[in-house]
Amino acid sequence: MNDSKPILDLQNVNKSFSGVQVLYDVSLNLYPGEVHCLVGENGAGKSTLIKIISGAYTCDSGTIVYMDVPVHHLDPRWALGHGISTIYQEIDVVPVLSAAENVCLGNEPRKRSGNLDLPEMHRRARKVLDDMGVSLNTNAQVGTLAMASQQMVAIARALSLNSRVLILDEPTAVFMAAEVEMLFRIIRRLKAQGIGVIYISHHLDEIFQIGDRITVLRDGRVTRNGGVNDFDKNSLVQSMVGRQIDLSQRNGNVEAGEEILRISDLSRKGAFENINLSLHRGETVGVAGLVGSGRTEMARAVFGADPYDSGKIYLKGKLRRIRSPKRALALGMGMLPENRKEEGLVQVRPVAENGAYSAVQANARFGYVPWRRIKRTVRDAIRNVEARYPSLNSEVRYLSGGNQQKVVIAKWLAARSDVLILDEPTRGVDVGARVEIYKLMHQFKKEGKAILMISSDLPEILTQADRILVMAKGRIVAEIPHQEATEEKVLGLALEIEKEKTDEVQ
């Protein structure tokens, strides 16, 4: 800390929704030039607290002091105008606009005539991105960029507003080690400039690498706070969930059965090429690689969400041409997408309805939908994934991130899918929910299902996958049994291929 007074000080903040209290006398302060980590399980109250700081919610009681001035009417416009910027877990960009337009959104440079000054817009965006150390085409349409690049654009927009406080909610959810280190370099620069950072992450290793102080929330209450050196990983987890959890353990091996999926020479220009892999009943195949390596694009093509140019897909021994997710579902495939908010769920519809979408197609015959059986199946599936929700009729948007993830998994469980493609299955999920999802994956394997798992979390890949495929530049460059895999080996393979490509260009 480089100042004796906090830049932001919250004292005894309370908040309730419809009579249900979610924050109880929460106090938190932030000093210039420090990273204050806010941790807790999904539903602990972290998102509510940062929405109060950003002005999206109003607290019921308590005090907020910003730069020595009490704030009585905090709203989003005031917060942004006074240097409080928030990067939410669900990336907030405008997909149809360019990177430059997103960086300058709401603060666009204009000519004397009042028209947009596009050259100046690109110059400003390029300067912010260069200061961050991010190489990105400012003309690129943001919706075409990888999730990690979209996250960098969102951060650049916040920094373009001369922020004094930057709130980062799960900023590395889709990053691998190289991208995480890039973000940490950016955060260290911000600290040196006196900017205060509130950092939220379920990746506990990151907390100890970048944090200065930690505040732990559980069930809406502060259970512990202190300097990073006052914690170790075990004591931090116990403060968060009230019990000991070991994420380094496998759930046990399942003997692999017959081949259920085989992909042969699958290619799409500019995305991936000559993808060859097989998947057997009772196994999880993990796909690792840097952002932009083609992992998600390959998975979406297999599921029929995106087209492919050439190659063959064999499912249960038969050659299949999968042109749509509807066809994939009919053949017994399910997919948990990388972006659950937009592609996995209908946020304004009830939990039960979201769980039933895939089951309707899987069970309907000749136009007849057996609703009674489907409702029973959906209830059982949601119960099996141990999702927590007020009611099956509650809109899914009100669930925590981990519980939303479980509803997506329940949807495919209800549809009785034999092949599950899980793209970042624990993105934005707390340690407790993560263990429960791993148990579900193990149960799927015991039932003879097969899982293709894409993950940017190397420890997750190492503990949950039976075989690991490493992708780089759209190609599978290595296959490693889990017994032989280490973080250094997997990341080294991906980075060496990237380096070789760079050397070839030079």
Image: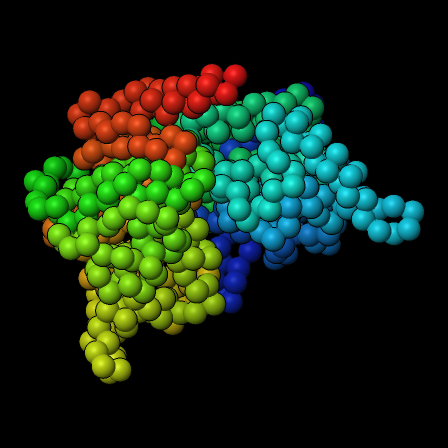
Toward the right, the furthest residue is 112
How far across and how far down the image is residue 439, in percent?
21, 45
Please tell me which residue lies in front, 97 or 173: 97
Question: How many tags in the picture?
Answer: 0
Quarter of the image for residue 492 reads top left
Residue 316 in view (yes/no): yes
How far across and how far down the image is residue 428, in percent?
42, 44
How far across and how far down the image is residue 306, in percent?
40, 53
Against 432, residue 505 (above or below) is: above
Going by the image, does 43 lie left or right of 287?
right
Going by the image, does 311 lie left or right of 80?
left
Write the residue at 43% across / 57% down: 343
Write the residue at 27% across / 33% down: 469
Please say which color scheme the image uses. rainbow
Residue 241 in view (yes/no): no
Write the residue at 65% across / 41% down: 139
Please tell me which residue lies in front, 468 or 73: 468
Against 448, residue 210 (above or below) is: above
Going by the image, does 181 lie left or right of 195?
left
How far across and how far down the image is residue 197, in percent?
60, 33
Write the residue at 51% across / 33% down: 37
Where does the N terminus fall, quadrant-wise?
top right
Going by the image, does 158 lie left or right of 203?
right
